[in-house]
Image (tube, helix red, strand yellow):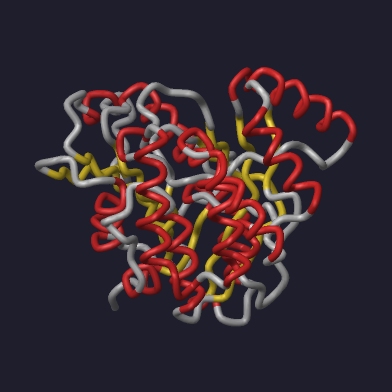
Amino acid sequence: MALQPDPAHVTVIIPAYNRAPSLRRAVQSVLDQTHAAWDLLIVDDGSTDRPDEAIAEFRDPRISIIRHGTNRGVSAARNTGIAAARGRFVAFLDSDDVWLPQKLERQVAAVLAAPDPDGVFCVAWTIVVRPGGVRVVLPEQSPRDGADIGAFLYAEEGFAQASSFLLPAAHARRTPFREELRQYEDHLFLMEAVAGGARYLQVPEALSVWFDDDRPDRLGSRDNLEAGQRFIALAGRHLSPRARAAFEARCLGPLLWRQSPPRALARFVSAYREGGLSTGQLARLLARCVLPGAAVRRLRAVARRRGPTALPTAPPTGGPPQSR
């Protein structure tokens, strides 16, 4: 009799592009998982730094590498992994992020306890490490059942990032990542999965670590604006007026401010009128645009000491392929 596949098996997908040193750390965090039923697919997205050599020390048969001949972007790399996945579930880990040891165990347990394990999209809380080593756990609150995911992410200062995702492989194949996006691709992947019938399931525990640093390969403001406009064009039907106005204000407004403060201010006012920004959020967003960066960081530090009213940063943007 043929062996039945493990119903708790997870295929872990790491897209990698010229990140050999951090890739080793990411792979080690997978090997450290308390959940044993997994295999790891590293999708080398045209790297020049030989990721296979970086992980040669591990010699684990559960680890395999798929290579792209050219750099096609993080969405294409994840989709390649999804297509090749052997597990019932897939989970994503960016090559410069890490998981806590219980990450897969906690999420798989939550999914299998759901009435329909093959119909959920599971997201864990994330430890965000900012420049200077400051750590915060996001989101500060979870969305309600049936909530507007776009409004949660942009109007309610929510948070979701690919390294915290776990979902059925079959669902990921039905609604793959949009390969034309260089940023915000993980947000659209989540919104399209939920629109396609997946139920958002939050695990209220920090299980992944996202390093939000100031690397020189981050996209510039012009690229960010263009990426945001592409996102809006693709995600438009998934964004309520409130969510769209909040996205344009929080994610694009500070970048637009560098080019045209009046146009940026118009976005802020529009978001406020749509209910996408509270009075406090509007004030903090203006401070972020007007004050020097060092002053904003000092104010944020003071706010953290006083409670959960810190100056907002833009939601995670699904950075460029180079950052994965």
Q: Nearer the viewer, residue 166 or 288?
A: 288
x, y percentage for residue 12? 39, 51
Compared across the picture, whether 223 is left or right of 247 comes to left
* Quadrant into which the N terminus falls: bottom left
Quarter of the figure with residue 47? top left
- The residue lying toward the viewer, choosing from 96 and 243, is 243
For the point 66% across and 55% down, the residue is: 269
Q: Is residue 18 left or right of residue 37?
A: left
Name above or below for residue 167 compared with residue 290. below
Say whether residue 34 is visible.
Answer: no
Residue at the extreme right: 306
The answer to which quarter of the image holds residue 189 is bottom left
Q: Residue at x 72, y 64 (%)?
A: 275
Q: Residue at x 53, y 67 (%)?
A: 121
Furthest residue in direction front, as rendered: 262
Q: Is residue 284 above or below residue 153?
A: above
Q: Which quarter of the figure is the C terminus placed in? A: top left
| Image coords of residue 131 (percent x, y) | 59, 22
Q: Is 123 left or right of 193, judged from the image as shown?
A: right
Is residue 9 found left or right of 136 in the rendered image? left
Tell me how many marks there are. Answer: 0
- Residue occupying the point 31% across, 25% down: 20
Residue 146 visible to the viewer: yes
Q: Residue furthest left?
A: 69
**Could you say where residue 42 lies in the image, as x and y percent from the top left?**
29, 43
Q: Vertically, is 304 above or below 137? A: above
